Image (spheres, rainbow, N blue to C red):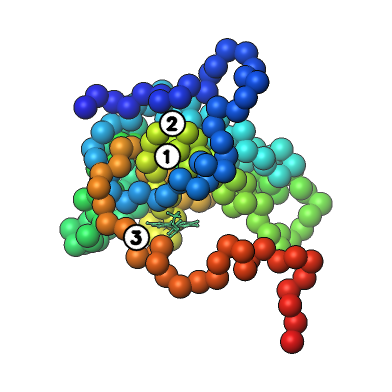
Amino acid sequence: MGPVRWAVSTRSPGRRKTPRVDVRDALRRRRMTRAFDGTPVDEPTIADLCESALRAPTAGNARGVATVVLAGTEGARRYLEAATDAAWRATSPRAAGLLAAGGAVVVLCDPPAYAARYADLGAWPVPYWFGDAAFATMSLLLLCEEAGLAACFLGAFRREREVLSLVAAPEGLRVFGAVLLGGAAPGRRSASLDRPGPTRAARVIRGAFATG
Ligand SMILES: Cc1cc2nc3c(=O)[nH]c(=O)nc-3n(C[C@H](O)[C@H](O)[C@H](O)COP(=O)(O)O)c2cc1C
């Protein structure tokens, strides 16, 4: 199969009267895919998705979020080789499926950009840079859904220095995580989905949490 191109173009001429994609449907359908089928996704396609995703809000319009496009299966492999160690890749049942992703996007944020924008703020009880990176990442996941691409967000819980070095990030930038994308292969259902936990309805609190 050749490289994946836009299933749905975001560059439609003029304004559309009806929405092209139902946000509720996209939210309902979206799932993290950990097994890809090896179909490469080309750089212009991924860059286009990133440009749209970066319409997400940023605190004070600081725009301290950047995405690095690593296109094709080679891009996904380079990301995973930086972000994971060889022992994990050799033994994890998930490694082969992730290594067959068609590309990767590394999501970076720039804390100094927020310090400059909010010079008067002092301490940061809620670091805006990670919040902004999360807004952009979620936008990217929804755009992948719209484009018919499977995707998986991978958190940055190890080897941040190696990932920053892979993309030659300027001093001060932090890794928020990465999105692998591509075609989905038949895969096992994630055990996380069956983990017991509160329902969505129970997490909609009307007014205040119940006491006593
Ligand atoms: C901050 C964050 C970090 C995550 N890190 C990983 C990860 O490193 N590897 C992974 O396979 N999934 C990761 N996930 C995906 C979650 O496990 C997944 O969203 C959750 O199990 C619900 O599944 P769903 O997104 O398919 O509905 C992460 C999600 C978030 C929001």
Q: Can you say whether 76 is above or below 82 in the image?
A: above
Q: Check disc 1 and report the residue beneath it.
A: 105
Inspect this view and state whether residue 107 appears.
no
Of the numbered discs 3 and 2, the one sitting upstream in the chain is 2
- Residue 104 at x, y percent in the picture: 37, 40
The kind of residue on which mark 2 rests is Ala
**Residue nearer the viewer, 199 or 158:** 199
> Mark 1 belongs to which amino acid?
Val
The quadrant of the rendered image in which ligand 1 is seen is bottom left
What residue is drawn where x is 33% and y is 44%? Answer: 79
Seen from the viewer's position, the closer of residues 10 and 47 is 10
How far across and how far down the image is residue 63, in percent?
Answer: 64, 37
Residue at left 66%, top 52%? 128
Q: Residues within 10 Å of mark 1 (few under 14, many from 20)?
A: many
Residue 1 screen position, x and y as percent: 21, 27
Residue 120: tell me if it is visible.
Answer: yes
Side (left or right) of 128 relative to 87? right
**Measuring 21% from the left and 50% from the top, which residue is drawn there?**
96
Q: Which residue is mark 2?
A: 147
Disc marking residue 190: 3
Who's the residue at 50% across and 48% down the image?
Answer: 28
Tally of numbered discs: 3
* For residue 108, above or below residue 203: above
Q: Is mark 3 within 8 Å of ligand 1?
A: yes
Q: Residue furthest right?
A: 120
User: Of helix, strand and loop, which one carries label 3?
Assistant: loop
> Nearer the N terminus, badge 2 or badge 1?
1
Q: Residues at badges 1 and 3 in contact (C-beta under 8 Å)?
A: no
* SS under mark 1: strand
